[in-house]
Image (cartoon, rainbow, N blue to C red):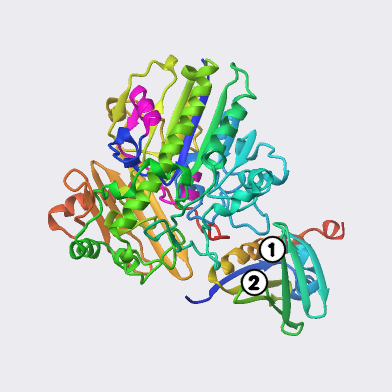
Amino acid sequence: MPRKILFITTDQQRYDTLGCNGGQVARTPVADRLAAEGIRYERAVPQSVVCMPSRSTIITGQHPSTHGVWMNGVPLAVDAPSVAQVLHDAGVKTALIGKPHFEPFLDPFAAFAENRFADGEPVNGHRGFDHFEAATHGVAGNLAYARWMQKNHPEAMGGFYPVLDGALEVNAMGGGETGMPQLWTNPIPKEWYHTDWCADRTISWLDTLGNDDDFFCWLSFPDPHHPQDVPASELGRINWRDVELPAGYIADQARREAVLDAKPAHWRAWYDGRLVSNYEAPANWVPATLTEDQIREFTAYNAIACELIDEAIGRVIAHLEARGIADDVDIFFSTDHGDLGGDFGLAFKGPYHVDGLMRLPLIWRPAKHRAITPATVSAPVGLVDLAPTFCQVAGLDAPSWMEGSSLPVSDDDAAARGFERVLTEWDSNLFGVEVHLRTITRDNWVCTTYLRGTTSDGTDGELYNLAEDPLQQVNLWNDPSAAAMRSDLIDDLWAHQPVQQLPLATLVAPV
Amino acid sequence: MTLGSIRHEIVINRPAADVWKLAGDPARLHEWFPGITGLTLDGNRRTITVAGGLTMPEDIVINDPSARRFEYSITLPIFTFHRGMIDVIELDPDRCLVVYSTEADPRTMALVISGGCYRALQELKRQMEAPIEETVA
């Protein structure tokens, strides 16, 4: 049996950006076709809503409490378990092309291998990968895409948005027509943008393989994560003025703020600009200033980024088809976490365990020889389930250190194999501000319990009935009629929560 | 915003005087701080080059062998303020506590720099606790 895996991830992509998931803005025919031919998951949940912990979950098959990457800026141990290593050891050729981010990016001392490969250090099977070509959002850092741009198109490097400001905070500078932070007009030709570069480099690596070679290729697009600085030539695809506001945006200010006030205190504190709890959004931006037009323009740019990714994936698949091996490939598509995208009048990300960040696109288009019937799975699954799935596809038993299970291929399969709950964690401690959340998604409910932190005494939380309140606007945490459900969910959460490895690993960079 | 302030510390199983001999010598920082690829010293001005290619000029503010405190300031324009402090504190005749503190404005730079300081403390401990043969080699 062929063991060929094309694992495609994006960064910070919302569930509702795909047409097959009901998205109305971006056109994503390639992802839609994969979903139609395969399995589309309606409740795929990350184990962390920020990049490094979530990506570490993907590669280890473990929850953050176990792999130890509790926040961006905490490196995944070099000897941490890796599904790529498992596959490599079984004779599968392995590559990661695009954004890795298992190790900090702001690295002036070049302490981390990811930041040294582009300057000639041998990859030497780092984390199980034979081949490693890294990119991130723009041309900063010592990564392969940045080096490629420096060598080939230095004149275009200045067109990218400066992700960080002069103080190395996430930049609040606005652009476009609305002054939306992290939005920019980038004159770079589409062919030089990192989305196309990632696809080009993937095709190039695939061409080093024979048709009989087994492979695990992780194609990891940096977009649609902010900054929204897609090539200017593509902006005509979507007129932002025509974009509908997201369903999760509450237009009435008084009602919006009442909804925020019914959530734990750090929601409203961030909205008002009184508290910045983490490094994941512009530090000098006040969400309460977000306008409807800014949300529309952000959504349009973001959708264009998603369209470019979809087209780039289409090129890779077309290449596999031209070689006659596309049907032999198990293709996975997902992302590491979502984006608030205007929901509740907020954008970017942070310690907010709601659908904008927690409900992810996930598609598995199985290889034809598996004869798996196309399906939609509504049972909750996690990114923690990806690594065991890759093992299964490769005909391997999942190692005991993996904490998930291979993805179900139908709801019946999910029920038979006990896919009941998914857990998500947040721990941050930045310049004296601490937030700690533990969340369970189960039975169409989402329950988040807060541990003691800067704005929480450890008694508050969030409880949402997804069936009756799909936008999570009614916090039932203190509703007596939901007390039994709340208690049951919290008991279940703690019964299944992995024991956190202590002491926590040291935070050594902001991101 | 307030300054960024980050402190890392480590216990080293060597006498404080031995540790200070290395950690307190401004000309030997590159011997125990991973990622420093070059160092020049001119009076109280020290310039280091890091592996990422950046050159950082520094002013030495305190070098007090009695208190075993070394303090310096990076004077790159990106810093409105920086202060790095190394304290070697005797715990008993055979052990000491080394504290490496970083304060900076902009505050994010404290986190960027202190990540290197954390690794430096680990390397300092490794070197100081290594068998004599390895230390000599």
Magenta stretch holds residue A46: yes
Where on the picture, by quarter, is residue A406?
top left
State yes or no: discs 1 and 2 in contact (Cβ < 8 Å). yes
Magenta stretch holds residue A247: no
Task: Give the crowd class for mark 1: few <14, some 14-19, many >=20 residues within 10 Å.
Answer: many
- The circle on residue B120 is 1
Residue of label 2:
B100
The spot of residue A440 in percent (x, y) is 31, 47
| Whether residue A423 is situated above or below residue B59 in the rendered picture | above
Residue A412 shown left or right of residue A113 in the figure:
left
Q: State the count of labels.
A: 2
- Residue at coordinates 39% horizontally, 26% vertically from top-left? A34
The spot of residue A188 in percent (x, y) is 54, 46
Q: Secondary structure at mark 2?
A: strand
- Residue nearest the viewer, comparing A32 with A114: A32
- Residue at coordinates 53% horizontally, 64% vertically from top-left? A165
Residue A488 shown left or right of residue A25 in the figure:
left
- Residue at coordinates 28% horizontally, 28% vertically from top-left? A411
Task: Give the crowd class for mark 2: few <14, some 14-19, many >=20 residues within 10 Å.
Answer: many
Which amino acid type is shown beneath numbered disc 2?
A: Tyr
Q: Cα distance, mark 1 to mark 2?
A: 9 Å
- Residue nearest the viewer, comparing A199 with A62: A199
Do the residues indicated by labels 1 and 2 lie within the same chain of the protein? yes
- Residue nearest the viewer, comparing A220 with B25: A220
From where the camera sits, is residue A419 visible?
no
Residue A114 shown left or right of residue A8 in the figure:
right
Q: Chain of mark 2?
A: B
From where the camera sits, is residue B67 visible?
yes
Bounds of the magenta segment:
A28-56
- Residue at coordinates 48% horizontally, 48% vertically from top-left? A66
- Whichever of callouts 1 and 2 sits on the residue coming sooner in the sequence is 2
The spot of residue A472 in percent (x, y) is 23, 51
